Amino acid sequence: MAMQQRTERINVGIFAHVDAGKTTTTEHILYESGRTRALGSVDAGTAVTDSLEVERQRGISVRAALASFSWKGVQVNLVDTPGHVDFLSEVERSLRVMDCAVLVLSAVEGVQAQSEMIWNALRKLGIPTLIFVNKMDRTGANPQAVLKQVRTYLSDAIIPVQRPLGSEQSYTGAADLWSEPGDSAERTGLLETLAERDERLLDLYMSGEPAELAVWKSHLQAETAAGRLYPLVYGAAAKGLGIRELLDAMIDYLPRAGGDPEQPVSGIVYNIQRDKSMGRMAYVRLYEGTIRNRDAVRIHTQDVQAKVTQIRKVEGGKAEDVGELAAGDIAVLYGLAGVRIGDVLGSPDAIPQEAKLAVPLLTVRVFWPADTDDQKVIAALQELADEDPLLDAQWLPDERELHIKVMGPIQLEVLGSVLAERYGLKVTFGQPSVIYQETPAQAGEGYVAYLMPKPCWAILRFKIEPLPRGSGLVYESVVRSSDLLPQYQSETARRVPEALQQGLRGWEVTDLKVTLVEGNHHVWHTHPLDFAVATPMGLMDGLARTGTKLLEPVLAVRIVVPEENGGRVMNDLVQMRGSFEPPVLQGGRMVIEGRLPLATSLDYPVTLSSFTKGRSTFTSFFAGYEECPPDVSAERTRRGVNPLDQAKYILSVRNALQG
């Protein structure tokens, strides 16, 4: 019986390309649902979900905010995500905990590079999705063109369930195709699209029987919940048009959250923020079980227990203590002191896979005034790296340097203001430099016999083979445990990824298969850590024999410029070692799509904007690593002693291990 009493719940992420009007849509949803009494505005800096000072100043949502409300008896957790590509890691983490999504597109700009990228991630994870075409009241709004684009770039299974009334400034809303009287071309289109995809409905359609619309609609609901069809609705969020209908569509088409509150706890921390008075706030999606105030929870990934002091639902700056968090719900937990993003609470069994979109491509050195305590800056950035693990803050004590990884310049601007606002620290950043990678130039072998100075004994032989781009590192051992004991084999396996963090030129080595083909230990002389010392020497010996090729990050770009600037842009792309498809003309504008090395194009968006006098758009996203031409070289200063200098390396590692 307990299951009957449970509130129906939807966890929906709201996603969009920057400036498609996503935060405005969220504000109106909260207003219409009665959650907020006054409308916030992004432009006026009063948006409820933008709580950071820097968000209010810049008018962009940096943090994925969580808002909860009820609509027609269904509890909705709405996760608003940042639309800017520099904050993609935040989008990626939100995706993981969503059961369904609303993708906001602009009726003027249509499908932009990032909308496409988010769409691909939603499809990869099989997340049911609604499309909301916003800004229908703007000059240049063209729903037919947008529909054509979504079916070309996103999916031909996207189906409008409304008919727009009026256009541009005379837009007054949209009629629901299921309930409007009479037959319209749009309704016929809707039924035909459904019939094309289902034998039973096709028979019904061909029989000429009067359509029982409820049957068709329930089919669309089931197919949407299964992530196979995607309803599309229209609106103009800034005027509040289409918001109630969007809420109805969410309740109509999107699936309810599952999970059993009686099962053992299984949840994940997908976001961390700080509360000035309460400390660390852990945003948790619970898949199974129930957590109550003062419960001790096991943080599975760290193997520690932590006590929950409060469970709150947050509605933009305001929070209420709800006392418990049950399966299928999302809330903020307080009291979990050492918790990090990605930590699993309880059992990991019920937690879905992750979509990997964000790859930081730039590394930046952090500088601070001489009278500032180094440790304060290091501690602050470590804490921020707990909130965004991709920052990967690295302190190099010998060089007294602090380095972080970032996605782009806006992220640096935000980091600078967070460090000033939250920690009172004034920092500056060096010039961002591109993160390259290395890969073996050919197959080969690496060998090490670590037998001196005694006591030690470790012999290893590795086969190294290059793999296709994007393969990462694959490791296996074909050595019998009688030749090399399992504990020595696992020590070797553990050290391989570490050893490949720095190749011949100092960059991480990737896209290779490493196979341990020979290994020996000595009954008397071997110490378990001998294999920790030997593995990097064996691998570097192998890389010195195979040689390595340099790989650079490449962006997929979409550039829209006035026609008269097209020639210059194509010339610029060639100069930057880019490649592009034949350009497409769209009403006086030229659309150029192609690929561009990040290293040559770091400043190009600014250059483009200045010579087109702001009448251009440059959208890009990471498309993978590709081989650099032979004339491009990039070295990174090695940290620590190079394992190729074996005598010096052995001494330094032994000292470190003993220390």
Image (tube, grey):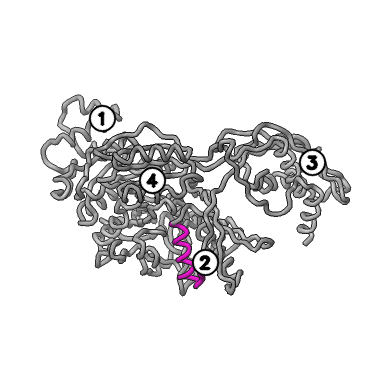
The residue that label 3 is drawn on is: 448
Label 2: which residue? 427
* Residue displayed at 51% across by 71% down: 425
Magenta range: 410-427
Distance between mark 1 and mark 4 Cα atoms: 37 Å
Query: According to the image, label 4 marks what residue?
Result: 619
445 to 69, vertically: above or below: above
Residue at left offset 29%, top offset 27% = 199
Image quarter (top left, top right, bottom left or bottom right) of the N terminus = bottom left
Contact? badges 3 and 2 (CB < 8 Å): no
Query: Which one is earlier in the sequence, the residue at label 3 or at label 4?
Result: 3
Q: Earlier in the sequence, mark 3 or mark 2?
A: 2
Task: Measure the C-alpha gap from mark 2 to mark 1.
Answer: 61 Å
Quick one: label 3, few (<14), some, or many (20+) residues within 10 Å?
many
Circles 1 and 4 in contact, beta carbons < 8 Å: no
The answer to whether residue 259 shows anywhere in this view is: no
Three-letter residue code for mark 2: Val
Q: Nearer the viewer, mark 3 or mark 2?
A: 2
Residue at mark 1: 195
Tag 4: residue type? Thr
Q: Percent x, y for residue 101?
A: 35, 48
Location of residue 33 in the rendering, given as x and y in whole percent from the top left corner: 26, 60
Q: Is 124 above or below relative to 3?
A: above
Relative image position of residue 274 (x, y in whole percent): 47, 67
